[in-house]
Amino acid sequence: MEFTELVEIIGAEPVFETGLLIAGNANPREIRRQLSRWRQTGKIYQLRRGLYCLAPPFQKVIPHPFLVANRVLPASYVSLQSALAYFGMIPEFVPVTTSVTTRRPASWETRLGIFDFRHIQVVFFDGYRLVDLGERQQAFIASPEKALLDLIYLEPGGETLDYLVEMRLSNLDQLDWQLLKHLASRIEKPKLLRAVSALQKLAGVEEEYESL
């Protein structure tokens, strides 16, 4: 396979897997050898074993970090600081794309950025949706409510008012408080219910849940 043929096959796909190229009479060993050679010459980037993207100037679409995160570890969704920044709820630029997974914690450092994955329990693996990122790219991202709860769940003392104030949260008026409480009730972590109460106080919401 010539490199021009690879570019034609990939087209506008932001990332691609080895399996896309191994079809018909293609020699898997030869394909992998060519991929290794193109990686060494800087024509493609390897994101993880079997996952690649075209390097500039050959790529037609710049891969979005959230899509890359989903593809690096499929059993995951973007959450925590990355999702909060995406929804305009924290002011800081987040240089690392953070996700959660039911698998073991992991981290990948690639030419497209750093991708961290933190572990949560299976029962708490929800509250995310497929979001259109533009340029025909999509990724699974936590809702603002779930991104907050994921962060609180994983950070010691994350439910305290002091911690939430330090985050400099904004746009709290966009939160669905019923959804927040529902998600917090899905797992036996009293700190999450305490966090809902603390967030209400921070947002100046008068309604209080008696169960809190």
Image: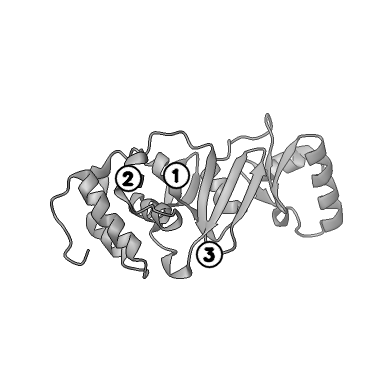
Question: If you read the primary sequence from the N terminus, does the residue marked by circle 1 or circle 2 appear first?
Answer: 1
Asked whether residue 128 appears in the rendered view, the answer is yes
151 above or below 56? below
Which residue corresponds to the image point at 35% horizontal and 49% vertical from the top-left? 144
Number of residues whose C-alpha sits closer than 10 Å to that of mark 3, classed few (under 14), some (14–19) or many (20 or more): some
Quadrant of image for the N terminus: top right
Number of numbered discs: 3
Left or right: where does residue 74 sit relative to residue 77?
right
Which residue carries the number 2 mark?
Answer: 162
Query: Of callouts 3 and 1, which one flags the residue occurring earlier in the amino acid sequence?
Result: 1
Pointer 2 local density, CA inside 10 Å: few below 14, some 14–19, many at least 20: few
Residue depicted at 26% across the width and 43% down the height: 172
Query: Tag 3's secondary structure?
Result: loop
Q: CA distance from mark 3 to mark 2?
A: 29 Å
Q: Amino acid at mark 3?
A: Thr
Colour option used: one colour
Q: In the drawing, does residue 131 fall left or right of residue 35?
A: left
Badge 2 marks a residue whose secondary structure is: helix
Q: Which residue is mark 1?
A: 81
Instruction: Give the spatial CA distance, label 3 vs label 1.
Output: 18 Å
Q: Identify the amino acid type marked 2.
A: Asp
Name the side, left or right, on which 185 lies relative to 96.
left
Q: What residue is drawn where x is 31% and y is 41%?
A: 165
Neighbourhood count class around disc 1 (C-alpha, 10 Å): few under 14, some 14–19, many 20 upward: many
Q: Nearer the viewer, residue 2 or 28?
A: 28
Residue 39 on image: x %, y %: 78, 40
From the viewer's perspective, is the residue at label 1 or at label 2 nearer?
A: 2
Say which quadrant the C terminus sits in: bottom left
Q: Which residue is mark 3?
A: 102
